[in-house]
Amino acid sequence: MIEPFIHLTAIAAPFPEGQIDTDVIFPARFLLLLEKRGLGRHLFHERRAKGGFVLDTPPWDGARILVTGPDFGTGSSREQAVWALADFGIRCVIGTSFGEIFHANCFRSCVLPIVLPPDAHARVMAAAEAQQQITVDLPEQRIILADGEIGFHIDAHRKQSLLEGLDEVGAILRDDAADIAAFEAAQRAARPWLYLTAQQIAHFDDIKEGSE
Amino acid sequence: MTDLLPPARTLFDKIWDAHVVKTYADGTDLLYIDRHLVQEVSSPQAFAGMAAAGRALHRPDAHIAVADHAVPTKDRHVTLREGLAAAQVARLRENTAIHAIPYIPMNDRRHGIVHVIGPELGFTLPGCTLVCGDSHTSTHGAFGALAFGIGASECECVFSTQVLRQKRQRNMRVTVTGALPDGVSVKDIILSLIARIGVGGGIGFAIEYAGPAIRALSMEARMTLCNMTIEAGARVGLIAPDATTLDWVRGRPLSPLPGDEPAALRDWALLHSDPGAVFDREVEIDAATLAPHVSWGTTPEESLPVTGRVPDPAQVDDPARQARMRRSLDYMGLAPGTPLEEIAIDRVFIGSCTNGRLEDLRRAATILRGRRVAKGVSAMAVPGSAQVRIAAEAEGLDRIFTDAGFEWRDAGCSMCVGMNDDRLSEGERCASTSNRNFEGRQGIGGRTHLMSPEMAAAAAIAGRLCDVRGLQ
């Protein structure tokens, strides 16, 4: 069970630079760490090392929402980028477009990615720059600003999983196991070459233990 | 009557449809995953999640594991004894032993970068769905597979269920006509495409590459093309299988057994977009008009023909785009208006899942033969796999590289991602055949210029970015 996302009221940090890739969010050398937790200290590591980064600048060091530029989270599939954001305390990212794998990864850590058209995005960015409190209301799919509301789209099952902190793997195993078994039986009959035989796997039998 | 005919479908839709286990009420699909490549960076947390939940591996025969990111490419016995990288590689070995997943160790003849060894083994097949916790999984689409990169949580889902709940992408077709001129390669096709549609241009799309110039490409070149599709934002890139594909697949260790082959061939013959299939976006490229490309900034989109100059932000109207360009130029230490061919380099890297295959090494060697790396330039060639290295050595390519002054290394991701000791130092500038010129990608403060293997070889000799067409 992960912490559900329902409502969030917080100030938002403005980070308008475009094309921030996941290497910038979480540099590759920290990918050697084997854990999911505690990665927030490496978030935007090089940017923060230079000093003056928005998430280290009061009051945005307490931000729980990040308002990003276009194509945020493109590049590497590393889920550490999302784990680091979540560990740092960011629960919601609002931008005009996100890298597709990053976007999918967000939901796995109950971080809500919101895609807005440019004009609506500009209003949220202005509120972030003005250090205003922003409320994200997931049940009603709206962002509440001091000067009005902005609706946003989210896929129904994504919304449900955020609201309930759903464990998708558990849900699939519970609800879909019979469908998966039926699919496999049919596919094994129709396309047997997609299932490696013992003879094929024996190709690896000569691999020696401890050869590195 | 016409409404009774089956609708014309794209290649992507055909493979997707064949793998739908069920469709949920909201329109998302539960997609069956045939094959999963496992590496050391994206798997430890997935295995840990599976263990914490007390869940079993659904199908051990659907996975192959190899450590490629963190492994050293020289002095392997000395450099991987301890430290974080050693721990990460050891963890992969332990996890795969627990779950009886085939694991290929670093010093095995089958070792290499996941995206190089999958096709070498025949693990990558036309019409299959294939995933890996690595964005360059799009590489395998070169075989007419539906292949895409996933996060670690999705890896865990595949381990436990063999399915992923996914929303179908829209279809984009990139049609490439014309013949590639001498000195111009598939890397230039993909860099020019990314420069044109942008790093976000493919978000939400599966890109099918088609047209006579694609049909003329070798499997290696097709892999380069599909590999970098993710740099245009698209998770999926794919090419319909043809005789070139079948020639590659036949006789590999994990290819269909002789008894299954006729049925597989009949099945694969249907793997093409039907005439009249509708694409949501179409892009056309005339390969004959392309020049060798190099990147100048910190996204692959920031690439230009090598004959050009570093662009000037002052000539761009959009303030956001102008700011982005200034940031790139500042990081790259470049002044607007500088001819790209005047940019001096310190390092050269030939390798990676993008350009670390035998054909790539041959193309670079053609330029390097009888020449020397420029004074002050440090150059390395890192084969994408042990098999590539063995084949290259059998035809003497290693000698061409070392005679020219290159280091000749063992296989791995190496300086494409800078997770082992192969890194740029602060401010160092590198001509690289890899896929990403992001800030810090090859080392903190390192400056990357992306290009083809022949262009990187030319840069090594010239000591600066240089038009390979003048060296041939």
Image (cartoon, coloured by chain):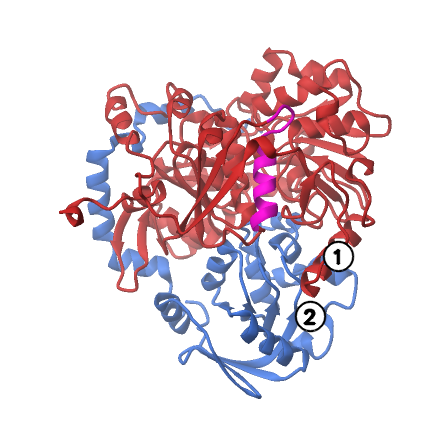
Chain colours: A blue, B red
The number of numbered discs placed on residues in the rendered structure image is 2
Q: Position of residue B95 (x, y in %)?
A: 46, 42
Element marked by disc 2: helix
Q: Chain of mark 2?
A: A
Residue type, mark 2 in image: Leu
B187 magenta-colored: yes
Quarter of the image with the C terminus of chain B in it: top right
- Vertical relation: B88 (above or below) A160: above
Per the image, the residue denoted by label 2 is A55
Range drawn in magenta: B181-197
Can residue A37 be seen here? The reply is no
Please identify the quarter of the rendering in which residue A153 is found.
bottom left
Residue type, mark 1 in image: Gln
Q: Nearer the viewer, residue A25 or B431?
A: B431
Q: Residue furthest bottom?
A: A147
Q: Position of residue B303 (x, y in %)?
A: 67, 44
Q: Nearer the viewer, residue A161 or B94?
A: A161
- Vertical relation: A154 (above or below) B114: below
Per the image, the residue denoted by label 1 is B315
Q: Chain of mark 1?
A: B
A123 magenta-colored: no
Q: Left of B186 or right of it: where is B472?
A: right
Q: Residue furthest right?
A: B375
Give the residue at x 77% y 27%.
B460
Residue A62: assigned label: none
Q: Position of residue A47 (x, y in %)?
A: 73, 60
Q: Position of residue B73 (x, y in %)?
A: 66, 30
